[in-house]
Image: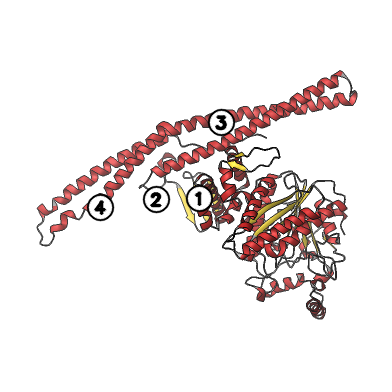
Amino acid sequence: MTISEDSVVHVVSPDSAESLAELLSTAASRLDAAISASQTHWMRLSEVFEVSGTEGLSYMLDPAARSVQEWGVALASASRALMDAAMFSLPDLVTRREALLVRIAEVNRLWADAASAVASANSAYWSTYERDSESSTTTAAQTRRMDALHDQDAANEAVAALQADIERFRRDVDEEENSLAGRLKGISGGDQVLGAWDQEVRVSQTSWGFSDQAYPGGPRTDTDLTGNFEDTMSEAAVSRLNWLSMVDAAKAADWVDEHPEFSASISFIDPEVAARLWVGLVSESTRGSGDGGGEPWVTGPLAQLFSVAPFAIGNMNGLQARDRDEFNRESLRQVIADPNATEEQRDAAEQTQKALERAAQQSPGGTIVQLIALELPANGGERDMRAAISVGDLDTAQDVGVMIPGMNSSVSESIFGLAGNAVNMQDARQRVGNPNTTATVVWMGYESPTELPWDGSSYVAEEALAQAGALSLGRFMNGVDFSNAPAETTIHAHSYATRVASYALAGDEFGGAKVDHFVMYGSPGIAESVRTVDDLPGVPSDEVYSTKSAGDQYVSPLITAGNMAKSISTEDEGWVGVAEMGELESDATGLDNVDPNDADFWAYGDRNVFTSDGVAGHSVDKSKKSDGYWSAGSDPIIDGARIMAGRGDEIE
C-alpha cells in the first residue's frame, strides 16, 4: 500500500506570488500616474477651445477617473495580500509539503520492508513447521513471524497517519487559497493567457469541452463535455460539502433546505477523491465514548454533516458501505420524523424502512443489511426517489451482485419487493454451494419508464432514461470497485434495466462500468448502440448471459391477445410477458434494440442463453400462475447464482 507523491497538492510558489505582487504594485502606480496626466490634459481643453454650452466639459472625465482610481486601490490591496502570503503562509505550506514528500519516501520504504519481512517470515515459518512443528527452530520462526506482523501493523498505522496528514494539508491549502482569493477583490484578468517563454497559450472552449496546450507545439489535453461537467460537479460538490461541515450549523441547515437538488450532485464525486476526503473528515472528528462500539459522531465536521446533511456522506461512491449505511439510516430517520416531509418523501422512506426490516428478518441470523444509497429530495416526485440496499456485507464480500429492476419501478412501489429478491439471491447462493462470502445489492438508482405511452410521460420505448440511468449506474459500480476492489461483481438486470446496464457497460460515454458477469432477464431490447456481445467492453464477452421465459416472448397476435385477456381478468400478470412487446414498441418508434436472446447478438462462439423453466410471464416475483425470474428457488435465480459464483458453464 504505497502512497503516491501526486496525492500531495501543489502550493503556489512564494516567489511567483511575490513577483505578481510587485507587478500589481507597479501597475497600480502607473495607472494612478496615467489618470492624473489624462485629467490634467483634459482640463486644459477649455483653455484651447471656447465653445458655448460646454461649460461642464471639464467634469466629464471624473466618473471614469473615480473608477480607475478604485481599480488602482484594488490592485494595491491585492499586491499587499500576495506579498503577505509570499512572506508568511505560502513558505510554511511549501515547507510542510516538502516534509510530507520526505515522509512519503520513508513510509513507503517502511511499508515495503515490512511487507517483505512478513513474506519472508511466513515462508520460513511454514517451511520449518512442515518439517517439525514442535522444534525450537519452528518456535523461533513463529516469534520472528509475529514480530514481522507487528511491524507490518505499525507500517499500516504509519500509512494511515500520513494519509490523514496529507488530507489535512490539502484542506489547509484549500483554506489558504480561498482566503487569498477573498482578498483579491475588485480585479480580474484579461483574455490573453501566457505560458512558457511568454508565448500565448492555446486554450479553446467549445460546446464539446476543452482543448489545452501549455505552449505552442506542446502536448494537447482534450476534455469532452461530459468529462468537464463531471469534473466541475465533483469539485463543486466537495467544496460545498467542506463548507457545510464547517459553517454555522443553522446556516448549513438553512442552505440544505433551500437546495434539495444538492443531494444529486454527491454521486459526481470521484471515488478516490471521496476516500481522501473521508480520511480528512475522520481525522478532525470524534465519536462519543462507550463500550458498545459504533457511537455517534459528537464533534468535528462529521458530527455536523451527520446532523444537517447525512445524505452527503451516505451517497458518496467509494466510501465503505458501513459508513454510508450509518449516515443513510440517519437520513431515513430524519425524513420519517419530519412533519413537513412531502407525501412522496414519506412513502419512499417508509417503504425503505420496511424493506430493511424485511431483509433482516428473512435472512439468516447475523446477516448484515446496509442502506447503501438514499436520495429523497423535497422537490422530487415518486420516480425521483433513489435507494439501494445490500443484503450481506458489501465491504468484505468476495462476490457482489447488483439487481436492477425494470419498467414501472420506484422506491415507494418496488424497494420492499426488491429486498425480498435480494434475500432470494442470497438463498440461491447457498443452494448452489457457493463457499464465498456474498452481498446482493438491490439498486433503485434511476428513473424507470412506464410500460406503455399512455401510462405516463415516459415509457419503455425511450432511450433517454436508460442513458441517464447508465451514468448513475456507472458511478455506483465504480464506487463498489474502489471500496471493495478484490470482489467479483455481477449485474442482474431485469426488463428495461438490461438497456440501462448495457449502456453502462458499453464504454465511457454512458458510465464506463466494469463487471465480471452480466445477466439479463426478460430483456425488451438492449442499448441501441450495442449490436453484438463484443460491443460491451465493460464485461468479458464469455460472461454475458441472457434468459427469457416462454411466456415472455411474442408467439402470435392471437395467443398474445388471449394471454393479455387472462392477465386482465385474473389480475395475474404471470399470464403474459411483455419483453417482446417492449421490443416491438421500440421498433415502432424507429429504434432498433437488439434482443440478446437472438443468435445475431452473439456474433460468434457460444450463445450464453439459458432457459427459465417454471416462469410463465415477465414478473420477477412469484404469481398465481408461475415463478418469477427472481422468486425464491426459481430456475433463473438459481442459474443467476451459479453465474455469480463463476460457474456459468453449469447453466442450461
Where residue 250 is drawn, which disc sits there? 1
Residues at marks 3 and 1, CA–CA distance in whole angstroms: 36 Å
> For the image shown, how many numbered marks are present on the structure?
4
Depth check: give the residue in front, 375 or 154: 375
Neighbour tally class for label 1: few under 14, some 14-19, many 20 plus, Cα within 10 Å: few
Element class at badge 4: helix
Q: Is residue 20 visible?
A: no
Q: Which numbered disc, 3 or 1, marks the residue that appears first in the sequence?
A: 3
* Mark 1 or mark 2, whichever is nearer to me: 1
Residues at marks 1 and 2, CA–CA distance in whole angstroms: 40 Å
Residues at marks 3 and 4, CA–CA distance in whole angstroms: 50 Å
Q: According to the image, label 2 marks what residue?
A: 191
Looking at the rendered structure, the kind of residue marked 4 is Ala
- Please give the name of the residue rendered at 80% of the width and 55% of the height, measured from the top-left corner: 362
User: Answer yes or no: do the residues labelled 2 and 4 have beta carbons within 8 Å?
Assistant: no
Looking at the rendered structure, the kind of residue marked 3 is Leu
Neighbour tally class for label 2: few under 14, some 14-19, many 20 plus, Cα within 10 Å: few
User: Answer yes or no: do the residues labelled 1 and 2 have beta carbons within 8 Å?
Assistant: no
Q: Which numbered disc, 2 or 4, marks the residue that appears first in the sequence?
A: 4
Element class at badge 3: helix
Looking at the rendered structure, the kind of residue marked 1 is Ala
Q: According to the image, label 3 marks what residue?
A: 100
Residues at marks 2 and 4, CA–CA distance in whole angstroms: 22 Å
Residue 466 picture location, percent across and down: 66, 63
